[in-house]
Image (cartoon, helix red, strand yellow):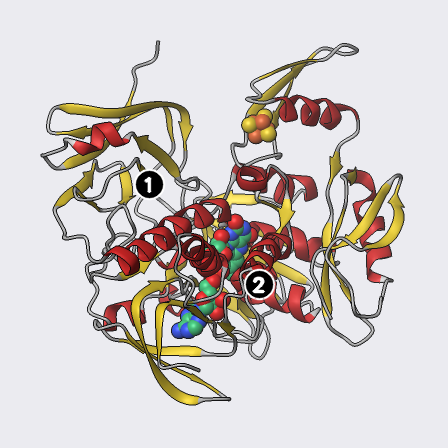
Amino acid sequence: MKNTYDLIIVGGGPAGLAAAIAAYDCGVTDILILEREDRPGGILNQCIHNGFGLTRFKESLTGPEYAGRFIAEAAKRNIPLSAGTTVLSISPKKEVTAINDRDGIFTVQAKAVILAMGCRERSRGALNIPGTRPAGIYSAGTAQKYVNCKGYLPGKDVVILGSGDIGLIMARRMTLEGAKVHAVCEIMPYSSGLRRNIEQCLHDFNIPLYLNHTITKIEGKDRVTGVVVSEVDEQKKPIAGTEMHFDCDTVLFSVGLIPENELTQEAGIALSPRTKGAIVRQNRETSVHGIFACGNVLQVHDLVDFVSEESEIAGKYAAEYILKGEVPFDDIPVSHSGNINYVLPQVINRNIGGNVKFFFRVSNTFRNCVFRVRSGNKLLCEKKKRIAVPGEMETLLVPAAKIADVTEPIEITLEVQPNE
Amino acid sequence: MNRELTCIECPMGCLITVEGEDTLTVRGNRCPRGAIYAKNEVTCPRRVVTSTVRLQDGRMLPVKTNQPVRKSEMFAVIEKINALHPAAPVHCGDILLYNIDEDAALVACDNIE
Ligand SMILES: Cc1cc2nc3c(=O)[nH]c(=O)nc-3n(C[C@H](O)[C@H](O)[C@H](O)COP(=O)(O)OP(=O)(O)OC[C@H]3O[C@@H](n4cnc5c(N)ncnc54)[C@H](O)[C@@H]3O)c2cc1C
Ligand code: SF4
């Protein structure tokens, strides 16, 4: 291992791989990817279902196939990847300290760093469900790893809390492997999963989805024996008298993902309270010059195609930073109306040219709505939408010419159109 | 008879209406894939099945059917998949079983050396 690299990438999932390939193709070849697991591919290695790559490759690939294409592209360019290597800290001066069983603890100096650590699941600890803590309780992602990577079915009778995509995918997966999924409970009035997953993972197998419901009690001493599920009111409080009982030996939690940002925080990078990821400019540069971020560590994506697209932006601009030097910040903030949960990028640096694609999520289900991007009283872009749901990321593309002469803060709004 | 469907072919998840008995008209699809999906769905619904097989050495290999199989046969397909135990090395795209349901074959989705 050398002591210095032009570009160090933390994480060898789809984000890290796409960023590395893009940076390489822009002329930076002295790259090192550091990956904690024993192989690249990230979370896609356990996502064996299909539906990946429709935007990018115009075919429906499984997770491992999608990752495989990027692993092959990185290998073609001989981009080195150090597997089994966990990054422990990153300094604002871009010194990266990591550990593995070949080199022990070591520090390498980079000219630029790309953060691509992905996200992890929220744990049950944060949920405060009364009852015992018996065996048989897993996060949906952990169950996915057991079933798909280890070939071990964690239980036979299952109740799933949360209707995120991973929970829906696991409902189908465990059903196909012989388990009975009795219910999927969602505390919100809508599912955060994609409609296609509700259709093909629940409806195909007659698995009931209870909206506005949550698990209010987990029973069992050594192993889960059952759960109580209750309807909730508008304040998310359980409604007495609505209790349903299910016998089950397994409870899966699919209650959302949070970007993995301990390293980012320690590097002194400003985080967004909304996305829990770094605040970035349109080139995916964080508040520290030369440190970029992309993929799920920045915002929780539901489509890996968007992860690849975003990571190529980070890779390209990290290469420009290395080859041409720092671009000073001349920042215009981006805000949004209350019915939008977050917008990324959060800042536009006016010294960077090019089109800007905004990614955002709405806070509820809206029909016949229109999204607008404004700067002061100038309209930069607008887009009509028949239906917008929180589970699906929205995008708006503002052409370079419109961004170039922006002087006032940018706001993204959602307005519901009166029925025609 | 009208049928309302959610297209599962891509993340747009178009809400599609299928009308008619013999000649079917399809509305609401934003692309031609949706029309094909909707017509299949009301005549003979089909799904791609993805799963894993355990290799002889115990490692797990992700697999998929290379085309959608009849929805009614999904569990039979899984049974055939679970009976397979190929030996490494396997490569992405290798065919592990022909005619797992009608013309569909089972293919490997990863490289395991
Ligand atoms: C359990 C789970 C299931 C998912 N299922 C789906 C799905 O079905 N469909 C879908 O489209 N999306 C799914 N996603 C979202 C999916 O993660 C993204 O589409 C995509 O994989 C994100 O890519 P990424 O590279 O940003 O993150 P990841 O794929 O998570 O890759 C991050 C990589 O960084 C490595 N890493 C983290 N910290 C360190 C460190 N300190 N040092 C070194 N390496 C580190 C990790 O080991 C990992 O390999 C799922 C996510 C999770 C968590
Ligand atoms: S009709 Fe076309 S655009 Fe709509 S969900 Fe189906 S495949 Fe996607």
Element assignment for label 2: helix
Q: Quadrant of residue A33?
A: bottom left
View quadrant of ligand 2: top right
Which quadrant holds the C terminus of chain A? top left
Residue A29 picture location, percent across and down: 43, 63
Determine crowd level at label 2: few under 14, some 14-19, many 20+ residues with C-alpha closer than 10 A: few
Identity of the amino acid at label 2?
Answer: Ala
Q: Which amino acid does label 1 sit on?
A: Phe
Residue at position x 60%, y 62% in the image: A46
Above or below for A384 versus A18 = above
Residue designated by label 1: A360
Which of the marked residues, 2 or 1, is nearer the chain's N terminus? 2
Q: Nearer the viewer, residue A160 or A398?
A: A398
Q: Quadrant of the N terminus of chain A?
A: bottom left
Disc 1: host chain: A
Q: Residue A31 carries which label?
A: none
**Residue at image x 44%, y 67%?**
A11
Which residue in the structure is indicated by mark 2? A75
Q: Subunit of mark 2?
A: A
